[in-house]
Image (cartoon, rainbow, N blue to C red):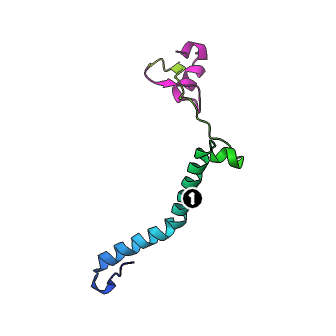
Amino acid sequence: MSTIDLNSMSLSELKELQRDVNKAVATFEDRKKREALAVLEEQARQLGFSIAELTGGKVARTRAPATPKFANPANPSDTWSGRGRKPRWFSDAIEAGATPESLAI
């Protein structure tokens, strides 16, 4: 470990060193956990498994990107997949008497 001569450092250098040390201390445990997890994942992969399979945890599933199903009649480039919150243009069109089928692409 190298020795740091604190007496020869300026105030701004000391404050920067303090920020760096505080950050290193705060993230030390997280870094160690990530390193350990990487080692375990590699060992599991060599055996043909994932960590989730070995621990009984849920395997993360990926969702396919949502394809647009509805288009704004005023601006056809403004689309909605039908997932998540309804866009205002969709709700306004329905209130104005349009049907979801008429807004479908």
Given the image, on which type of amino acid does mark 1 rest? Answer: Ala
Task: Indicate the position of residue 23 as horizontal and vertical percent values.
Answer: 45, 68
Q: Is residue 101 magenta?
A: yes
Query: Can you see residue 99?
Result: no
The image quadrant where one finds the N terminus is: bottom left
* The quadrant where residue 60 appears: top right
In the foreground, 102 or 5: 5
Query: Can you see residue 47?
Result: yes
Task: Indicate the position of residue 72 as horizontal and vertical percent values.
Answer: 49, 21
Residue at 64% x, 43% y: name it. Answer: 49
The residue beneath circle 1 is 36
In the drawing, does residue 58 fall left or right of residue 86? right
In the orientation shown, which residue stands out farthest toward the front? 47
In the orientation shown, which residue stands out farthest toward the right? 56
Q: Is residue 44 magenta?
A: no
Magenta residues, start to end = 77-105
Residue at 65% x, 41% y: name it. Answer: 59
